[in-house]
Amino acid sequence: MTAATKPPRPLIAGNWKMNGLLAALAEVRALAGRLARSGKTGADLLLCPPATLLHPMAQALSGSAIALGGQDCHAEPKGAHTGDIAAEMLADLGCRYVIVGHSERRQNHGETDAEVAAKATAAQRAGLTAIVCVGETRAEREAGRAEAVVTAQLLASLPAGCTDRNTVIAYEPVWAIGTGLTPTAADVAALHAAIRRVLGQRFGAAAGCMRLLYGGSVKAGNAAELLAVANVDGALVGGASLSATEFWPIVEARL
Ligand code: PEP
């Protein structure tokens, strides 16, 4: 098996969104404890808390294999951008990843593909791995345009220089996020195969091992099926990542 065809190491990532006060660090400690006691090392684990919890969570995760990530970053390294956070600041706190282009940012903050690409470039500059989110709306899926929409988003949201080390793709159908709805395993397989093809055409062998995550209402009850789909190299988990009890079975499904 060549380096280009070696299966990517799975990544199970939790996106806490705008949830969690200091007391929620108890969940992180519980998760780290379960991971350590399991003795399993078959996947990378990542938590992306709100910015207010990055520093205390870095402390809570000290000595653990669980990585830390931001939920967004600004494209510039510093400057007059009140309320924003530079990728360099995330790296400075010990983050290794940053989510860019989540559909909630695309929808609620009007982020364009070009802005997402600029943020992914910022992540590369800062030595972070960007988790670039793409996904179609319900209307786009019902119109039979899911693959075309995701392909267009990918081509416009990924900057030059993407490799399997600095970029992860998260396919997150907008209609599946936080709704309890999920695509069928066959639909996920079709989209992930299409994403793999597009990445190969754009980046060549460098994309062969790029990790493709599925996100959207992943729960303990559906994780094993979704994570077993071809070209699904892990999951981006929202609501179920807030509780160690709910997140752990998802992690275990691929650990
Ligand atoms: C997300 O926010 O990226 C997500 C997938 O959320 P949920 O798991 O709650 O659908």
Image: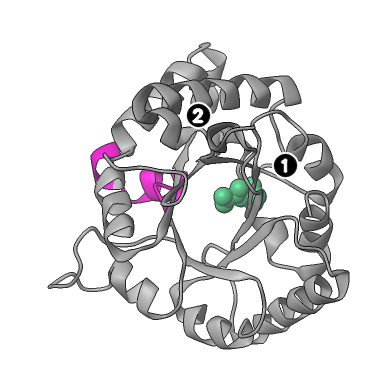
Q: Nearer the viewer, residue 138 or 229?
A: 229
* 238 left or right of 102 in image: right
Residue at 27%, 73% (x, y): give it: 83
Q: How is the image coloured?
A: one colour
* 64 left or right of 49 in image: right
Residue flagged by tag 1: what amino acid is it? Gly
Residue 45 picture location, percent across and down: 65, 62
Residue at 65%, 41% (x, y): give it: 233
Indicate whether 116 appears above or below 183: below
Residue flagged by tag 2: what amino acid is it? Thr
What span is in magenta? 99-115
Query: Which residue bears the numbered disc 2?
Result: 137
Whether residue 74 is in magenta: the answer is: no
> Real-space Cα distance between discs 1 and 2?
15 Å
**Quarter of image, res 6:** top right
Q: Nearer the viewer, residue 234 or 139?
A: 234
Residue at 73%, 82% (x, y): give it: 29
Query: Which residue bears the numbered disc 1?
Result: 180
Count residues near mark 2 (Cα–Cα under 10 Å), then give few for <14, some for 14-19, many for 20+: some
Indicate whether 18 appears above or below 170: below
Work out whether residue 209 can be spotted.
yes
User: Helix or strand or loop: what does disc 2 sit on?
Assistant: loop
* 109 left or right of 47 in image: left
Q: Residue furthest front?
A: 2
User: Helix or strand or loop: what does disc 1 sit on?
Assistant: loop
Q: Quadrant of the N terminus?
A: top right
* Mark positioned earlier in the residue sequence (1 or 2): 2
Residue 133 picture location, percent across and down: 46, 43
Work out whether residue 85 can be spotted.
no
**Numbered label attached to residue 27:** none
